Amino acid sequence: QVHLVESGGDLVQPGASVTLSCGSTSGTLDDYTMAWFRQAPGKEREGVSYMTAGESVTYYVDSVKGRFTMSRDRAKNTVYLQMNGLKPEDTAVYFCAAKSARSVMERLVVSLNPNDYENWGQGTQVTVSS
């Protein structure tokens, strides 16, 4: 189990950039598949980006491809979500999530199912509005 803490949410205008951070206060994230999810008012939680525990391979939902970049700094035990070209439809609470990945196979794949992630941060609000 890891305790995740997100930061970086902001109120910005369309086209702006925001970087979200997700760190652990209770252990290394090296053995975890990491993901960013978001939830807008009245909508279901949506997966935004995913990163394998092994080679830090990333996957993105189509709506953010080319605009968002997920990265991991193992020395800082932190995962980031760089969001460029923000649109009003990106407005949501963004959650960082971690799924234990200890086997060789687990470290090479990601899960798109939020129910598979055992650890969640408290969320950080991103609002895109003119």
Image (cartoon, grey):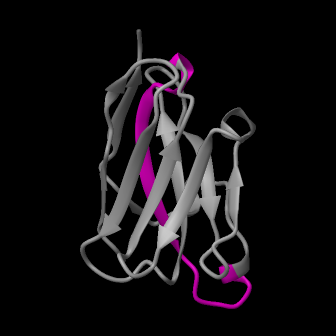
Which residue is depicted at the point 70% across and 41% down?
A: 66
Residue at coordinates 39% horizontally, 82% vertically from top-left?
A: 75
Q: Residue at x 57, y 29 (%)?
A: 85
x then y, percent, for residue 14: 49, 18
Rendered view: 27 above or below 37: below
Q: Is residue 65 left or right of residue 27?
A: right
Q: Does residue 85 sit above or below 51 in this rendering?
A: above
Instruction: State yes or no: residue 95 in magenta.
Output: yes
Q: Is residue 83 left or right of residue 112?
A: left
In the picture, measured across the screen, residue 44 lies left or right of residue 24, that is right
Q: Residue furthest top?
A: 130
Q: Residue furthest left?
A: 25
Query: Residue 86, image x and y in percent?
Result: 53, 27
Image x and y of residue 54, in percent? 64, 82
- Magenta-colored span: 88-107
- Is residue 102 a member of the stretch shown in magenta? yes
Quadrant (top left, top right, bottom left, bottom right) of the C terminus = top left
